Image: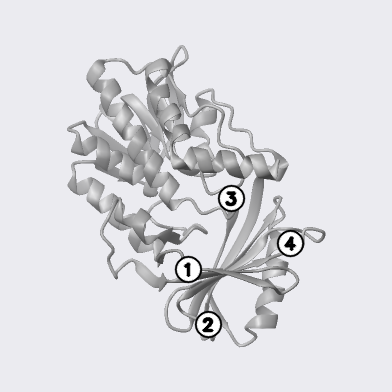
């Protein structure tokens, strides 16, 4: 690990990996740090992406595609169903997919450090100038012209740097999901069961992951993970009493407005760290990759122009808000609120 880089990326998920690779492809020196000991674990709840969205960033590869979906069905509390067949979707194996993105970043020249936690930003006044990195019991001061915070829903880096990252209590869903084997499912159809609003609201999903296997999960408002798990256990006992649970995952998904600002002096914030997951169902793979690429493109221009001020970097904030991602979020929130 060197003392300084053009770009420091905090977080090795899809947003961070795409950001790092984009900056490296432009000829900049890039360090990506991931706090966990391996990329792709633990798996987060989002595993679904449209085919056209995936192909913007990487060719489809059967190694990381668990299933190909050609229809989506919403099941209302009264049992009525609404179906859609708008294009093909993929269910990804996130462990393999996330690692593939990071490997491609490494091939582009990005230095990758795992089990490396960004403990705090290096600040000069209000400007972010790098980060203090903790790894294997040692501490390193790593300076960078621009830091890209891609550290997910649990992001602390942007808050430490002075950006308001507060999530309202009604702005997060508790999610629990199981990988369930030996069940009868339609392997080409993704299902969403809408839960009654007068009960808890939220939804249960069934994402096929291959022959007789599915990711089955629940997302409900609030932070009560035990309540979410009770709902999921009850659902599986009713629908798939003989299913075999082989993996359990839990976490929170932001379903609130994006951050008011996603840029500061020397800092850009992308993906879930910027609250840019889909505000209805919480999936954010495409949004993370899109904003990661966009942030890196703006960071490259900032470094080339010798101007990493907030004023310059706000071009990123404006660009994603003017994109389909920003416009769709505004539409959703104008309806919800």
Q: From the viewer's perspective, is residue 26 above or below residue 208?
A: above
Q: Residues within 10 Å of mark 4 (few under 14, many from 20)?
A: some
Which residue is labeled 1 in the image?
Answer: 85
Q: Label 1, label 2: how many angstroms apart (C-alpha)?
A: 17 Å
Q: Residue at x 70, y 51 (%)?
A: 223
Tell me, yes or no, if residue 320 can be seen here: yes
Which residue is labeled 4 in the image?
Answer: 227
The residue mark sitting in front, 1 or 2, is 1
Q: Which mark is residue 28?
A: none
Q: Label 3, label 2: how many angstroms apart (C-alpha)?
A: 26 Å
Q: Label 4, label 3: how many angstroms apart (C-alpha)?
A: 15 Å
The residue mark sitting in front, 3 or 2, is 2
Q: From the viewer's perspective, is residue 55 above or below residue 291?
A: below
On screen, residue 118 versus residue 252, left or right, reads left
Tell me, yes or no, if residue 35 can be seen here: no
Q: Earlier in the sequence, mark 2 or mark 4?
A: 2
Q: Earlier in the sequence, mark 1 or mark 2?
A: 1
x, y percent for residue 17: 33, 45
Which residue is labeled 3 in the image?
Answer: 253
- Secondary structure at badge 1 equals loop
On screen, residue 63 versus residue 166, left or right, reads left
- Secondary structure at badge 3 equals strand
Which residue is labeled 2 in the image?
Answer: 185
The quarter of the rendered structure image containing the N terminus is top left
The quarter of the rendered structure image containing the C terminus is top right
Q: Earlier in the sequence, mark 3 or mark 2?
A: 2
Labels 2 and 4 touching (C-beta < 8 A): no
């Amino acid at each position: 690990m060197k003392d300084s880089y053009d770009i420091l990326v905090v977080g090795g998920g899809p947003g961070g990996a795409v950001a790092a690779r984009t900056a490296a492809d432009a000829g900049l020196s890039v360090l990506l740090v991931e706090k966990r000991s391996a990329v792709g674990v633990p798996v987060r709840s989002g595993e679904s992406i449209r085919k056209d969205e995936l192909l913007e960033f990487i060719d489809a590869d059967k190694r990381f595609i668990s299933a190909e979906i050609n229809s989506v069905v919403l099941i209302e509390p009264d049992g009525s169903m609404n179906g859609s067949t708008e294009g093909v979707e993929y269910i990804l194996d996130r462990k393999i997919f996330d690692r593939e993105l990071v490997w491609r970043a490494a091939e582009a020249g990005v230095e990758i450090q795992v089990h490396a936690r960004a403990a705090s930003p290096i600040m000069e006044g209000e400007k972010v100038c790098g980060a203090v990195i903790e790894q294997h019991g040692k501490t390193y001061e790593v300076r960078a012209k621009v830091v890209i915070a891609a550290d997910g829903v649990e992001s602390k880096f942007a808050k430490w740097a002075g950006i308001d990252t507060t999530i309202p209590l009604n702005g997060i869903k508790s999610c629990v999901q199981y990988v369930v084997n030996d069940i009868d499912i339609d392997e080409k159809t993704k299902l969403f069961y809408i839960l009654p609003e007068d009960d808890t609201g939220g939804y249960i999903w069934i994402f096929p992951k291959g022959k007789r296997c599915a990711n089955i999960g629940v997302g409900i408002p609030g932070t009560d993970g035990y309540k979410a798990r009770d709902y999921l256990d009850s659902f599986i006992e009713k629908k798939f009493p003989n299913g075999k649970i082989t993996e359990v995952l839990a976490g929170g998904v932001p379903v609130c407005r994006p951050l008011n600002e996603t840029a500061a002096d020397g800092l850009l914030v992308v993906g879930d760290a910027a609250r840019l997951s889909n505000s209805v169902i919480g999936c954010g793979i495409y949004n993370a990759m899109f904003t990661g690429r966009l942030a890196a493109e703006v960071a490259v221009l900032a470094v080339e122009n010798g101007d990493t001020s907030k004023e310059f970097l706000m071009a990123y904030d404006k660009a994603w808000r003017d994109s389909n991602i920003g416009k769709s979020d505004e539409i959703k929130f104008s309806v919800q609120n």
